[in-house]
Every structure is written in structure tokens, then in C-alpha cells.
Amino acid sequence: MRVLAAGDHFVAPALFDEALRSELGDGHDLDVGHLTAGWPAEPFGPVGAEGSRVEEASGTEDELVAALEGRRVCLTQMAPFTARVFDACPELGMVAVCRGGPVNVDLDAADRAGVAVAQAPGRNAAAAAEFAVGMMLAALRRIPLADAELRAGRWRGDFYEYSEAGLELDGATVGLVGYGAIGRIVARVLRAFGATVLVADPYTDAETARTDGVELVELAELLPRSGVVSLHARLTDETRGIIDADAIARMPDGAVLVNTARGGLMDYEVLPEALRSGRLGGLALDVYDVEPPPDDWPLHAAPNVVATPHLAGATRQTAHRAARIAAGEVARFVRGEALAHPANATGKEVGS
């Protein structure tokens, strides 16, 4: 079977190749081609023409079409699978995307072409959860600022003054907006710290919340009760801009807001004034409305901001786990078994 491992500089083609051979074992004649896109050295972005544009993709349609010639299956993270790509690759039967959501694939076009698409939910759940908690601690205790001041030769003993001192997670109430695989791990860690955890997620049931020891509430109740609000929701039409000026106004004065999920969940224009006025006591961001933020980004000069360049999922374990999950889906496809994580209608038909 002819396969394309379309990786990048995080989930490299060699990781896909190794994982696939491990999953299939001996007895399969594999011809695995390699294609490496520029991410993360080159930011991802939209690729393709209007009507079949895909988001958060890396590489070009032309190089992908050329690499896919005669290939039956592709394992990828961010290759741009647009309608044009599917139309140009009639032998393609399956695409395994090692991401929690295949936003780099036009799923309607895949269905029209009869191509099964699989995804990899939870592949970075542990990494993203640990990072989110780290961002909370960094903002609550002003760790990056204290580090920068000391490196600049300033001993900020005034940070020990009551008015400047940080806050603890022990005894805090933390609100999680979104409660999927990442949110559940975050909640478990926060409860170990001694925090009370509120959850707003229409897809979470009361029994799951009780079992996990969290309180399931509506967003309107979560915001005024939470000293820390952390976003873990998927970006959909319903969640886009869910944290806006009105939402921030409902939060307690001095609350900390953390976003390690998706930039589109928030209105970034209202954040600088919320920080200057004290409505927000701290802001921790790993994702942005524009990536990377421009040089004149207002939050560069805003107080009490912790900002990192979309790193929450960046662990070596995530890369290996992602490759294994994608390879497992390809192995199921090859054996004619049902996919564990189908992303489109054609994918759901495999093995049926």
C-alpha cells in the first residue's frame, strides 16, 4: 500500500512512518512517502480558494497534490486538504489527521470524493491541561514578571507587600468554560490544589460532573463566582466571542482570565482596558485572534499579562501520541474495521 506521511517539524513524517509500521506489523507491503511542511517555523493559516478554504493549515495545495500521486492513504497534522486536493487525487481513500479537530480538511469535499477522514481527540490533552494550570499559577503569582525584574537587576521586595502579593489556587473558585478531555484533567489537578471547580459546558451531564467532583452551572452563573476563568471550549459558531465585554463585566474585580484554547473564543479589543481598570487582575494567553500578534499589539504594554506563542500542546509525548493515534486509524482502515475517531460521514461508514 502506498502511503504519504505529510508531517511537519513537530509531528515529523518519520514519527508517522514508525508508528504505522508498528501498528500494522509484518506482512504489509508499505511504500511510505514523506512530505514536511514548514510549521511551526512558519505560522499556520488558511489555505485554498473561497468556498473550500481550510483553516490552520501548513504547506501548499500544489506540493500536497504532487506528493499524493498514486497514494491511497495520508497521515498528517496540518496538510491542506481542500476540494482542489481531493479532486486532483482520485486514488486517495483515507486521511488520518492527528489533531483533535481536522480544521485543515474540507470534510464536505472529502465526503463527495468518498474519502474517509479520521481525527485524534485527546492527543494533547495532558500537555494542554498541564500548561493551562501553569499559566494560572504564572498569572496568579506573577512569576514571569518577577523573573524579568530580577534578571534586569531589580529585587522587587515590594511584591511581598499585601497590595502586591499574589493569590493561591488553594481555596480559589475556578471556572472552566468547556469540559472535554483537557478540561477534565485541569479540573482534577485544580481539585488536588484545593480549588473549587465550576464547569460550564452544554455537552456535559450532571452525573459526569458529580463523579468528577465539579459543579455544573450555566456560564452566567460561572462568571461572577469565579476568581479564575479558564477557557477549554472548541471554537464553533456558538462559542465564538463568548468572552466579550459583557462577560468580563460579570466577573469579579481582579479576576484572572486564561485562554489556552482558541483565540476566537474572546474579544481581544476589550482586554487592555479591562486590565488597566482592574476589572481583570491578570490575563494569561497562549492563543490569539491574530497569530502572531503584531508589533503594535496593545497587550504588549498592558499590565499583568502572561503571553506565550501557542505552546500548550508542545510536548514530545504529544507528538508521539498523535502519530500513534493516526496510525491506529490507518491500521483499522487497512483491515476494514470501523474507525475509532471518524470525522466525516464516509469515515463513519468504514467497516460497516
Image (tube, grey):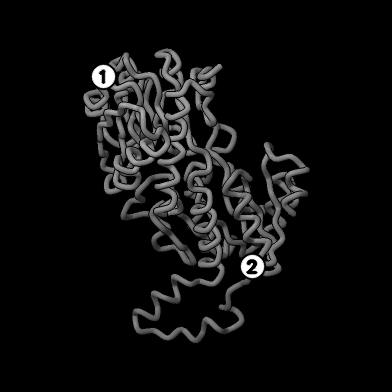
Q: Locate residue 270, reporting x and y percent.
A: 51, 51
- Examine the rendered structure and indicate whether residue 259 appears above or below residue 155: above
The image quadrant where one finds the N terminus is: top left
Asked whether 176 or 218 is in front, the reply is 176
- Disc 1 marks a residue whose amino acid type is Gly
Asked whether 253 or 225 is in front, the reply is 225
Mark sitting earlier along the chain (2/1): 1
Task: Judge the density around disc 2: few (<14), some (14-19), many (≥20) Cα neighbours within 10 Å.
Answer: many
> How many numbered circles are shown?
2
Task: Judge the density around disc 1: few (<14), some (14-19), many (≥20) Cα neighbours within 10 Å.
Answer: some
The image quadrant where one finds the C terminus is: top right
- Disc 2 marks a residue whose amino acid type is Leu
Contact between labelled residues 1 and 2, with CB atoms less than 8 Å apart: no
**Is residue 273 among the parts visible in the rendering?**
no
Mark 2 residue element:
loop
Asked whether 107 or 341 is in front, the reply is 341
- Examine the rendered structure and indicate whether residue 304 appears above or below residue 351: below
Q: In whole angstroms, how far apart are the C-alphas of marks 2 and 1?
A: 55 Å
Point 40% across, 63% down: residue: 301
Point 37% across, 46% down: residue: 291
Point 51% across, 61% down: residue: 135
Asked whether 32 or 105 is in front, the reply is 32
Point 42% across, 86% down: residue: 155
Q: Is residue 16 left or right of residue 178?
A: left
Residue 30 falls in image quadrant: top left
Name the residue tied to disc 1: 70
Name the residue tied to disc 2: 169
Mark 1 residue element:
loop
